[in-house]
């Protein structure tokens, strides 16, 4: 009987034992990414914004604190304030807030459209102004065909936009 | 000779999937016609509204895909027989769901830039959707961690049952919290007639695409398992032969 140690040869030539390094790496990235998302959800996403009428009233919507506010851009209120700044007024449930941002808002920004502005409320001689850093348009869930016949209807809606929620 | 060649090739297609593939192409062409030509511009969003016809169907199909993954995971765990076919359909559906969810996120970001003025913001719908996407990438990574087919099937089935709970969280996030993302449009009848029809065309086209992809992918997975089993059988036979010598 031959008891000499046998030569070790791979049982399946050319096939190495598969190490799931890639899967483990992806899993680690997923855990880190998931953690970031949960953090962002808890700190930013639940109360994404304060409504204009909640400023200084609702907890977390305090003057001087960095927040986002939501309201409808008042008709005729948009103007350029020089140095690339834009001024407008937003309203919600009868309350209004003058807003100043350091850039020209993009997207569908226009009068009578709901917007969310990031920044903070500052008091200037008893007048509250929202100094914004970013303007995001908040489009509603209505989809209507573009149609010239609806110009009158659009004008009526624009005239009534200040009363919009 | 011909039979041998055919059995070695083992294509994942059948007559049914070939017809289904043709239907997918027809459906996507139909969607392109309605989505790009026949449907009207939106009063506010103008032509940007056309992203809707990809964004919404892919989101819904991703939800469906993840629910199918959950149901098939129950199917695997429920029966004592532990049929791996349930597991393979679950895995294939999750893969397709991740692709569709990725398309939803990318189209949503493009749409966000056009209408909101930003690609991304941390609102509840966007954040939970990204979390769902990341969770199912994790599910696919867990499937690939190694072990036997049944070990893979068991651990991924348990994870799928937990992950599917996120689907209602994403769907109702616009109702439960205060988001930038718009509320539901379809259920509340807020879409113009032709826009709604075009969305329906998109839903049909992407549903056919989902079924076609899952059928092919689960067959490819079955072949992967078969190859792995054959490799193991060959290795065992080799060792037995060695022992006899």
Image (cartoon, coloured by chain):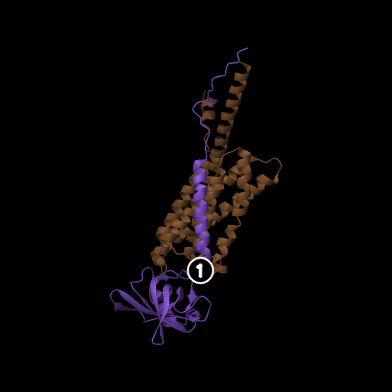
Where A28 falls versus B128 (above or below)? Answer: above
Percent from the top left, x then y, of residue A82? Answer: 28, 77
Percent from the top left, x then y, of residue B221? Answer: 55, 39
Which chain is indicated by disc 1? B
Q: Can residue B155 be seen in this view?
A: yes
Percent from the top left, x then y, of residue B43? Answer: 41, 70
Chain that appears brown: B
Residue found at the far front of this picture? A4
* Quarter of the view holding residue A125: bottom left
* Quarter of the view holding residue B116: bottom left
Instruction: Look at mark 1 in the image and give the residue it sits on.
Output: B179
- At 49% from the left and 27% from the top, the residue drawn is A14
Residue found at the far right of this picture? B80
Chain that appears purple: A
Q: Is residue B204 visible?
A: no
Split into 4 quadrants, where in the image is the C terminus of chain B? top right
Percent from the top left, x then y, of residue B6? Answer: 52, 29
Residue found at the far bottom of this picture? A126
Relative to B10, is A115 on the left or the right?
left
Disc 1 crowd, CA 10 A, few/some/many (<14, 14-19, 20+): many
């Amino acid at each position: 009987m031959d008891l000499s140690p046998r030569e070790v040869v791979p049982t399946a030539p050319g096939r190495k034992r598969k190490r799931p390094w890639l899967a483990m790496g992806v899993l680690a990235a997923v855990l880190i990414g998931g953690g970031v998302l949960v953090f962002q959800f808890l700190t930013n996403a639940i109360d994404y914004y304060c409504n204009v009428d909640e400023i200084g009233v609702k907890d977390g919507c305090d003057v001087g604190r960095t927040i986002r506010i939501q309201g409808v851009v008042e008709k005729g209120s948009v103007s350029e304030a020089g140095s690339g700044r834009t001024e407008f007024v937003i309203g919600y449930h009868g309350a209004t807030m003058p807003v100043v941002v350091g850039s020209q808002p993009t997207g569908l920004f226009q009068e009578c459209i709901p917007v969310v502005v990031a920044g903070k409320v500052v008091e200037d001689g008893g007048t509250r102004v929202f100094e914004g850093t970013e303007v995001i348009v908040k489009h509603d869930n209505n989809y209507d065909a573009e149609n010239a016949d609806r110009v009158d209807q659009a004008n009526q809606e624009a005239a009534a936009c200040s009363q919009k929620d | 000779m011909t039979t041998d060649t055919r059995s070695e090739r083992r294509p994942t297609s059948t007559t049914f999937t070939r017809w289904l593939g043709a239907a997918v192409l027809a459906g996507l062409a139909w969607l392109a016609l309605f989505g790009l030509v026949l449907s009207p511009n939106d009063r506010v969003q103008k032509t940007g509204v056309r992203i809707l016809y990809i964004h919404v169907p892919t989101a819904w199909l991703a939800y469906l895909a993840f629910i199918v993954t959950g149901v098939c995971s129950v199917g695997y765990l429920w029966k004592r027989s532990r049929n791996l076919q349930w597991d393979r359909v679950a895995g294939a559906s999750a893969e397709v769901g991740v692709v569709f969810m990725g398309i939803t996120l990318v189209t949503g970001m493009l749409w966000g830039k056009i209408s909101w003025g930003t690609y991304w913001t941390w609102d509840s719908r966007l954040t939970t959707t990204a979390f769902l996407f990341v969770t199912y990438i994790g599910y696919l990574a867990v499937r690939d961690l190694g072990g036997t087919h049944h070990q893979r099937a068991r651990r991924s089935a348990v994870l799928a049952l937990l992950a599917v709970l996120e689907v209602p969280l994403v769907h109702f996030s616009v109702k439960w919290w205060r988001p930038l993302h718009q509320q539901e449009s379809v259920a509340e009848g807020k879409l113009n007639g032709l826009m709604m029809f075009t969305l329906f065309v998109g839903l049909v086209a992407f549903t056919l695409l989902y079924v076609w992809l899952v059928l092919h992918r689960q067959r490819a997975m079955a072949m992967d398992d078969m190859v792995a089993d054959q490799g193991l059988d060959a290795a065992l036979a080799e060792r037995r032969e060695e022992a006899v010598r």
